[in-house]
Image: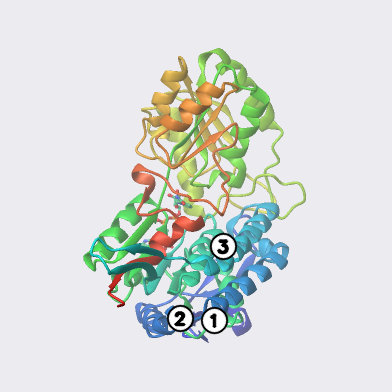
């Protein structure tokens, strides 16, 4: 591979050659090599942390308009180049070009939103209980924020963490998932031209066990925000807490879409297909459990099977493709393994259930639907993270709600109903961080909080103004001015 195709880490304002590189290949076209990307050593990760620590005080004191200009620059460029960058994202992750373009556009919106938020950083003022004493409550940057991201939304997750980190005056060390460095590298390249002082943003591409471990164990990193799997999240949390750092975790889920007898079934099927299969089902908000009330159970399945047969699965770069490939070989093997184990548990396959040999060659699996499943089957307890959904029959609404809440996870939950009373009850009683009524469980906005309960999330919420809770620390100042 030529030197020109090598993509270095960005440390202390410079592109720094790494001790090692790895090849990034498309999961949807195994002949498509995207490039060679740095595989950082632990020393290179330390260098990035040191650069961020050295730069953090100056950025913490930076002017709000300076921060706003930097964030606007990044956001505007992401939006202007969303089609071009979206194509690279689609190549490296396996999602369709439309999904990749949408993700880059949304990433730009995160930066634009937090650009505006820089000017809305207000404190509080109070009189003391002691006469003549005044109190200010202000928020200050945390310092150095370590950002560790997964492969399924390689640009958007980085954006929704980097943007508020910078907006609230922190320095950043970003480590993307190993299989998707290209999106993070493009983001870093834009940031490198944004006017941000050297060292405030650093990119270290590499493995979780090496680079991620250095970030989560470093006493110089004041806060770590992580999106990924539950076991890794638990491990990182223990590391960070050993240094009394701040921690924010967004992890897996087993989201339910509840379809009631009074549902508009066309809408129910549309929401189920969107939530379960788009993005190849590799969304933490995917509807993997379809809980259907007995009265519409059989008809719902019939309509699902008919609509699934129309889905266009294939090359994510081809016109009209709706569902691309799995994101990597490990994920592909994992989903095929779950298909086998679901059959062994007694689930009845009604659609898909097989790997697809397509041209170009890649990790393709047909959208898969099982019926006659129960909530205690493994397939309904563990996160599959692929184009696979299971129908669970419910006797009535109360039963459906109980099944919906009977899970170790709690990110999103959805209900399809025409009853205002049921919708209102579900919004109150669903034990999840986000609730959707007559909408897919996947698909959230960028200006409001995002996060879950139970094993799905830990720490304060991401996105919108709620992000301030994680990216700042509160200081309470008392003074007796006269
Ligand atoms: P993962 O946990 O394997 O990896 C996530 C990140 O952690 C990667 O960058 C990885 O390199 C790093 N990592 C791995 N081991 C580490 C260690 N010992 N120390 C520090 N860092 C380490 O997850 P994944 O397979 O990349 O992503 C899929 C998971 O992400 C799914 O479980 C999915 O539900 C979850 N996810 C959640 C959300 C959400 O917002 N809740 C969003 C997207 C994905």
* Dots 1, 2 in contact, CB < 8 A: yes
Q: Residue at position x 22%, y 65% from top?
A: 242
Image region (quadrant) for ligand 1: bottom left
Quarter that holds the N terminus? bottom right
Q: Which residue is disc 2 drawn over? A: 59
Q: Which residue is disc 3 drawn over? A: 155
Relative image position of residue 239 (x, y in whole percent): 26, 64
User: Which numbered dot is residue 137?
Assistant: none
For the image, the number of numbered tags is 3
Q: Which residue is disc 1 drawn over? A: 196
Image quarter for residue 211?
Answer: bottom left
- Report the side of 143 relative to 24 (left or right): left
**Rendered view: 177 above or below 368:** below
Earlier along the polypeptide chain: callout 2 or callout 3?
2
**How many residues crowd mark 2 within 10 Å: few (<14), some (14–19), many (20+)?**
many
Q: Can residue 93 be spotted in the picture? A: yes
- Report the side of 130 relative to 222 (left or right): left
- Report the side of 320 relative to 200 (left or right): right
Q: Can residue 29 be spotted in the picture? A: no
Relative image position of residue 124 (x, y in whole percent): 40, 63
**Rendered view: 166 above or below 315:** below
C-alpha distance separating marks 3 and 1? 19 Å
SS at mark 3 in the image: loop
**How many residues crowd mark 3 within 10 Å: few (<14), some (14–19), many (20+)?**
many
**Front of the two marks 2 and 3:** 2
């Amino acid at each position: 591979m030529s030197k020109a195709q090598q993509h270095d880490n960005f440390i202390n304002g410079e592109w720094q050659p790494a001790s090692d590189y790895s090849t990034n290949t498309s999961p949807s076209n195994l002949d498509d090599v995207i490039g060679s990307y740095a595989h950082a050593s632990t020393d290179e990760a330390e260098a990035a942390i040191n650069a961020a620590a050295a730069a953090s005080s100056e950025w913490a004191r930076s002017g709000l308009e300076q921060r706003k200009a930097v964030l606007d620059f990044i956001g505007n460029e992401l939006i202007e180049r969303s089609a071009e960058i979206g194509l690279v994202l689609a190549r490296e992750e396996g999602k369709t070009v439309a999904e990749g373009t949408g993700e880059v556009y949304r990433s730009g919106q995160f930066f634009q939103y937090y650009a505006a938020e820089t000017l809305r950083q207000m404190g509080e003022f109070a009189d003391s209980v002691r006469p003549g004493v005044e109190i200010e409550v202000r928020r200050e940057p945390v310092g150095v924020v370590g950002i560790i991201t997964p492969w399924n939304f390689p640009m958007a997750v980085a954006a929704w963490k980097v943007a508020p980190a910078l907006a609230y005056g922190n320095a950043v060390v970003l480590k993307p998932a190993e299989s998707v460095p290209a999106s993070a590298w493009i983001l870093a390249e834009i940031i490198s031209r944004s006017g941000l002082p050297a060292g405030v943003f650093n990119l270290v591409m590499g493995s979780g066990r090496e680079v991620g471990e250095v970030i989560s164990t470093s006493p110089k990193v004041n806060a770590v925000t992580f999106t990924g799997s539950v076991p890794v999240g638990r491990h990182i949390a223990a590391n960070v807490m050993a240094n009394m750092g701040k921690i924010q975790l967004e992890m897996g889920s087993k989201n339910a879409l509840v379809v009631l007898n009074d549902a508009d079934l066309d809408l129910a099927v549309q929401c189920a297909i969107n939530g379960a299969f788009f993005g190849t089902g590799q969304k933490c908000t995917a509807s993997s459990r379809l809980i259907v009330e007995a009265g519409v159970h059989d008809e719902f399945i019939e309509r699902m099977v008919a609509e699934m047969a129309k889905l266009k699965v294939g090359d994510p770069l081809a016109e009209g493709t709706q569902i691309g490939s799995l994101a990597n070989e490990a994920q592909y093997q994992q989903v095929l393994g779950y298909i086998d184990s679901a059959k062994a548990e007694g689930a009845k396959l009604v659609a898909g259930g097989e790997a697809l040999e397509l041209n170009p060659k890649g990790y393709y699996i047909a959208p898969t639907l099982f019926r006659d499943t129960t909530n205690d089957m493994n397939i309904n307890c563990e996160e599959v993270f692929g184009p696979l959904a299971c129908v669970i029959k419910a006797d009535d609404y109360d039963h459906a709600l109980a099944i919906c809440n009977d899970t170790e996870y709690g990110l999103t939950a959805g209900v399809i109903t025409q009853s205002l009373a049921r919708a209102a009850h579900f919004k109150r009683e669903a034990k999840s961080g986000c609730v959707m009524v007559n909408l897919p469980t996947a698909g959230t906005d960028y200006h409001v909080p995002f996060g879950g309960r139970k094993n799905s999330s830990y720490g304060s919420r991401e996105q919108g103004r709620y992000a301030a809770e994680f990216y700042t620390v509160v200081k309470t100042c008392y003074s007796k001015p006269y």
